[in-house]
Amino acid sequence: MFKLKKHLLLFNIILFIILGLFLINNSNQVRAMEGLFHEEIQEITETESEENEEITHNISKTNIISKEKFVSLHEIGHAVVAFELSQRHREYPNLIKLKGIELKQDDETIDGSTDFSFDRDNLFGHLFALSVYYGGLEAEKTIKTPIEEIKNRGQHDEQDIEKTAQYITERGWFLGDFYLSTDSLEIRKNKIKNIAQTKTQEIIQQYQEFLSPLADELLQREVIGIEEFQKLLKELIIQRKPSQKPEQLETIEKSNYNHKKTKCDCVIL
């Protein structure tokens, strides 16, 4: 009887050891399978991430705006501001006038210019010119896609803005209307610049949906005179804003562009 109990105890010990070894081995297999599963998931995730990055890169690359389109859009910004301001002030028909836009490009460089004139003997002529100088910069802000790298980009707009604002404030123009006599010269300049920039922003917003197609036309033609500019704008209004066509077309049709020499001096941006 004692031997039987001893054998049963030994059997239970051996069975317990075998069961323990089985559980340890099974646990190792489970952990190994889990590790393999996580490795596969990580590999799939990394692959998908790489694919998504590649897709995003390709989309971004496709949507990058060229430097040619960028420069063209910049000049159209100047042009629409000069054009709109000339429409709004018929009591001064020669106060400001748009004359044309041009792109100059070769294999290595591209540059643009907007030809407009303003009455240098009238304080409002200088104020309107200040708004036109802001036109290109504000048009750039409408771009929502990456821009192709542009080397040696000039800062002439910023220089013209600063120079014109200083010219106005040094003469005390608009004193009491836009700034106070107690304001410093720098504060006066900033207030004048804010007035001009706000007007420019309103105009750019008004013409925003026409900027890109007009820029495409300028890219294709390279030179657009005022009559051609009016025609293109009229066609775009018909295509895109039929509900507003009568009012805007009437405004364009009634514009009076007298290209005879006046007190105005031409300005190339």
Image (tube, rainbow, N blue to C red):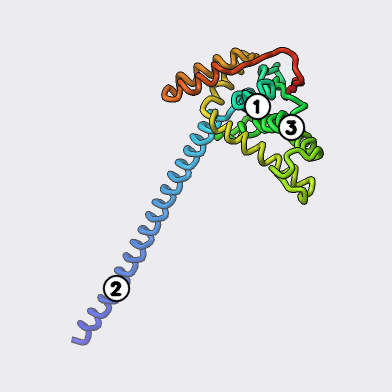
Residue 150 falls left or right of residue 25: right
Instruction: Find the distance from the CA under tag 2 to the CA under tag 3.
Output: 103 Å
Q: Earlier in the sequence, mark 3 or mark 1?
A: 1
Amino acid at dot 1: His
The x and y percentages for residue 177 are: 69, 43
* Closest to the observer, 59 or 183: 183
Residue drawn at (70%, 17%) of the image: 104
Quadrant in the rendering for residue 252: top right
Q: Nearer the viewer, residue 264 or 23?
A: 264
**3D distance between C-alphas at marks 3 and 1:** 20 Å
Identify the residue at horizontal 45%, vertical 48% (top origin). Answer: 42
Q: Which residue is mark 1?
A: 78
- Could you tell me which residue is drawn at 70 percent across and 33 percent down? 127
Place residue 32 in its image quadrant.
bottom left
Toward the left, the furthest residue is: 1
**Nearer the N terminus, badge 1 or badge 2?**
2
| Secondary structure found at label 1 | helix
Give the x, y percent position of residue 190: 72, 44
In the image, residue 93 lies at what x, y percent?
A: 66, 21
Please tell me whether residue 132 is drawn above or below residue 182 in the rendered image: above
Q: Amino acid at mark 2?
A: Phe
Q: Which mark is residue 16?
A: 2
Q: Residue at x 79, y 45 (%)?
A: 185
Q: Which residue is mark 3?
A: 123
Quadrant containing the N terminus is: bottom left
Q: Residues within 10 Å of mark 1 (few under 14, many from 20)?
A: many
Counting from the top left corner in percent of width and height, residue 191 is at 70, 44
- Which numbered tag is attached to residue 86? none
**Depth order, front residue of 99/89:** 89
How many other residues sit within 10 Å of disc 3, few (<14), some (14-19) or many (≥20)?
Answer: some
